Amino acid sequence: MARRRNNILVPEAKEGVDQLKAKVANTERPEDAKFEVAKEVGVPLQDGYNGGLTSREAGKIGGNLGGNMVREMVKMAEQQLKNQQ
């Protein structure tokens, strides 16, 4: 049986994560974030089926988006700690 990796551990956080994704990708909607990142890194992502993408191309999109989200969360945490002092 395949392990499902997209389980949301804190369902209440989904909206906040979606907002962060849109902010990091400079889009209005979180659904558009991957298309914006794909355009930036030069990957021909289309709406619908993308079975022709290589693993490397797909990883460029997810890695870039995820890495930028983590970077932004670290900045937010640092700012929060700075404000507490």
Image (tube, grey):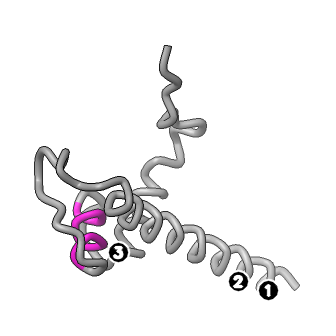
Q: Which of 15 and 33 is in front in this view?
A: 33
Residue 8 in picture, x, y percent from top left: 52, 37
At x 59% / y 68%, what residue is drawn? 70
Is 54 placed above or below 25 here?
above
Are the residues flagged by discs 2 and 1 in contact, CB closer than 8 Å? yes
Mark 2 residue element: helix
Instruction: State whether the magenta stretch is mostly helix, strand or loop.
Output: helix
Q: Mark 2 points at which residue?
A: 79
Q: In the picture provided, is 32 more to the left or to the right than 83?
A: left
Give residue 47's quadrant in the image. Answer: bottom left
Q: Is residue 84 magenta?
A: no
Q: Which of 26 and 81 is in front in this view?
A: 26
Question: Residue 82: which numbered mark, if any?
Answer: 1
Q: Give the range drawn in magenta.
A: 32-39
Q: What residue type is labelled 1?
A: Lys
At x 47% / y 64%, what residue is drawn? 63
Q: Mark 3 points at which residue?
A: 25
> Which label sits in the foreground, 1 or 3?
3
Q: In the picture provided, is 14 more to the left or to the right than 74?
A: left
Q: Could you tell me how far apart the alpha carbons at marks 2 and 1 are, in whole angstroms?
A: 5 Å
Are the residues flagged by discs 3 and 2 in contact, CB closer than 8 Å? no
Mark 3 residue element: helix
